[in-house]
């Protein structure tokens, strides 16, 4: 359980740092969504741009079966690399945005 608590801390820290650097103005808001009970974590943009509603998920991570599942990563750096820099083993990170047959070639966990 200590490992999972550490993973929660890492994820919340990285997403908070990412949100701080996100472009926000009076019409577009960056939202952090942390569900620590079900282990779902997101950074979402919401608001209005050019008189149209705007909504978009930038990062979505889950913790399942003692691993961090990256469901979506819209960043340039790649949050998986940042997690590895913090000390998370590649075997504990699933690049879930890749189809299961491809995951074996990523250098990260399959599932």
Image (cartoon, rainbow, N blue to C red):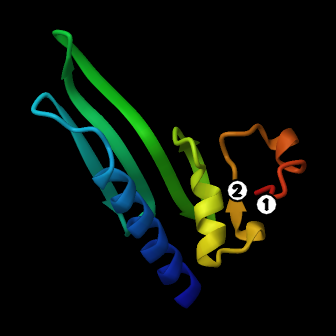
- In the structure shown, which secondary structural element does the residue marked by tag 1 occupy? loop
Decide which of tag 2 and tag 1 comes sooner along the chain.
Answer: 2
Q: Position of residue 87 (x, y in %)?
A: 64, 78
The residue most toward the bottom is: 2
Which residue is depicted at the point 60% across and 66% down? Answer: 83
- Residue 62 vertical placement versus 37 (above, below): above
- Considering depth in this image, is 77 or 90 the residue closer to the camera? 77
State the separation of the CA atoms marked 2 and 1. Answer: 5 Å
Q: Residues within 10 Å of mark 1 (few under 14, many from 20)?
A: some
The residue most toward the left is: 26
- Point out the image quarter for the C terminus: bottom right
- Residue 28 vertical placement versus 93 (above, below): above
Q: Residues within 10 Å of mark 2 (few under 14, many from 20)?
A: many
Q: Which residue is mark 1?
A: 109
Name the side, left or right, on which 48 lies relative to 73.
left
Q: Which residue is mark 2?
A: 94
Q: Position of residue 63 (x, y in %)?
A: 55, 64
């Amino acid at each position: 359980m200590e490992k999972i608590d550490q993973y929660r801390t890492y994820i919340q820290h990285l997403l908070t740092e990412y949100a701080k650097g996100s472009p926000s103005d009076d019409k577009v808001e960056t939202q952090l969504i942390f569900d620590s009970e079900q282990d779902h974590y997101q950074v979402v943009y919401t608001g209005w741009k050019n008189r149209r509603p705007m909504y978009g998920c930038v990062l979505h991570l889950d913790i399942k079966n003692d691993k961090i599942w990256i469901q979506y990563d819209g960043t340039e750096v790649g949050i998986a690399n940042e997690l590895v820099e913090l000390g998370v083993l590649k075997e504990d990170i699933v690049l879930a945005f890749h189809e299961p047959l491809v995951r074996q070639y990523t250098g990260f966990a399959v599932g």
